[in-house]
């Protein structure tokens, strides 16, 4: 290692400041080897920036590029499960768990990222509201498409099953 730290910058328009503040409030509470690490935040011009740990590929990209053993796949699945367990222990529902939101390190370890849709409320009473239902079609339970549908930690578990 050459001593240089690689970071990823996530850019959010200032007119989406609610999304920025929400994601920062979620990320700032999290400390786990199974979640992406935040280094800091700043603003410049019309944008807010979040400086995050850099990881080269997500699970979707990784699957297309590399051949992996059953043991490596099992370890990735276990890492994701540990990440979900940690989030739920912190009363956080990810709400958009999918292959592109799971990063794979050079050591073939998984880290969950993208907490913009995450919910910080009681795990038993989070309601999706408005036209932008959280989650991604194909990764969320069908009933979450219903207006006023409530999500629980089981929604993340469903998405985890789809990812596997």
Image (spheres, helix red, strand yellow):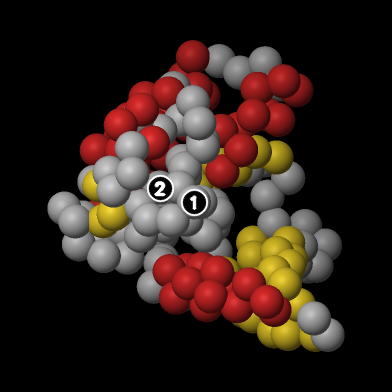
In terms of image quadrants, where is residue 141?
Answer: top left
Q: Is residue 64 left or right of residue 72?
A: right
Quarter location, residue 153: top left
- Crowding around mark 1 (Cα neighbors within 10 Å: few <14, some 14 to 19, many 20+) is few
State which quarter of the image contains the N terminus. Answer: bottom right
> Does 113 sit left or right of 49 as displayed?
left
Name the disc covering residue 95, or none. 2
Residue 72 picture location, percent across and down: 51, 24
Asked if residue 14 is positioned above or below residue 137 in the image, the reply reads below
User: Left or right: where does residue 87 sit relative to residue 68?
Assistant: left
Residue 8 can be seen, yes or no: yes
Residue 35 at least partly seen: no
The residue that appears at 55% across and 64% down in the rendered structure is: 37
Q: In this rendering, would 59 be left or right of 8?
A: left
**Residue found at x 80% / y 67%:** 4
Q: Write the residue at 49% across / 14% down.
A: 70
Q: Quadrant of residue 48?
A: bottom right
What whole-number distance in Å separates the C-alpha atoms at marks 2 and 1? 15 Å
Mark 2 / mark 1, whichever is N-terminal: 2
Image location of residue 137, percent across then percent down: 50, 31
Front position in the image: 3 or 36 = 36
Query: Callout 2: 10 Å neighbours few (<14), some, many (20+)?
Result: many
Instruction: Provide the residue designation for mark 1.
Output: 131
| SS for callout 2 | loop
- Determine the residue positioned at 55% across, 15% down: 69
**Numbered label tally:** 2
Nearer the camera: disc 2 or disc 1: 1
């Amino acid at each position: 290692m050459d001593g240089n730290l690689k970071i990823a910058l996530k850019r959010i328009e200032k007119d989406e400041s609610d999304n920025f503040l929400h994601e920062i409030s979620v990320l700032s509470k999290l400390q786990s080897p199974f979640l992406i690490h935040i280094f800091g935040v700043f603003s410049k011009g019309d944008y807010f920036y979040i400086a995050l740990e850099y990881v080269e590929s997500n699970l979707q990209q990784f699957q297309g590029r590399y051949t992996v053993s059953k043991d490596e796949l099992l370890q990735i699945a276990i890492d994701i499960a540990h990440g979900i367990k940690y989030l739920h222990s912190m009363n956080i529902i990810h709400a958009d768990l999918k292959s592109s939101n799971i990063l794979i390190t050079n050591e073939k370890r998984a880290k969950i990222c993208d907490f913009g849709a995450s919910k910080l409320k009681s795990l038993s009473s989070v309601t999706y509201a408005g036209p932008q239902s959280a989650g991604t079609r194909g990764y969320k339970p069908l009933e979450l498409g219903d207006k006023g549908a409530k999500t629980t930690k089981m929604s993340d578990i469903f998405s985890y099953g789809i990812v596997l």
